Image (cartoon, grey):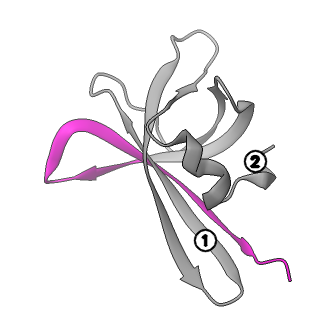
Amino acid sequence: MIEKFNVEFMKPYLNTKFRIVVEGFDPLELELINIKEKNQPGLESFSLIFKGPLDRVAHDNTYPIEHDQIGKFDMFVGPFFTPTKKDAIYYQAVFSRLKEE
């Protein structure tokens, strides 16, 4: 599933909810708020930026993720903190792979 993720595939899901699902815990809901593309010769590289609640933190890890339209998949996400934005905890998933010719 995740192998077909690219910028164009993910654009329709901007501002939608994704859930980190860990057995024994309530799902952690994250909103996809930005897709950052980085153009590099020979590489397809982009980041998905998510916004989550302040009351729980998911540490760097590969998690089972659920989305109502995409379905279930595993993805590595990690939190990052910015001094200017204190309204939420932000997460990033980075994709970098060779471009198909």
- Mark 2 neighbour class, 10 Å CA radius: few under 14, some 14 to 19, many 20 or more: few
Looking at the image, residue 57 sits to the left or right of residue 60; the answer is left
The magenta span reads: 79-101
84 shown above or below 27? below
Q: Quadrant of the C terminus?
A: bottom right
Give the Cα distance between marks 1 and 2: 14 Å
Q: Position of residue 60 (x, y in %)?
A: 51, 45
Q: Going 64% across and 58% down the picture, which residue do you hit?
A: 8
Q: Nearer the viewer, residue 28 or 69?
A: 69
Queried whether the magenta region covers residue 30, the answer comes back as no
79 lies above or below 15: below
| Helix, strand or loop status at disc 1 | strand
The residue at the point 49 percent across, 32 percent down is: 16
Residue under label 2, please give it: 2
* Residue 83 falls within the magenta-colored stretch: yes
The residue to which callout 1 is attached is 45
Q: Residue at x 71, y 53 (%)?
A: 5
Expressed as whole percent of the image width and height from the top left, the position of residue 27 reads 53, 16
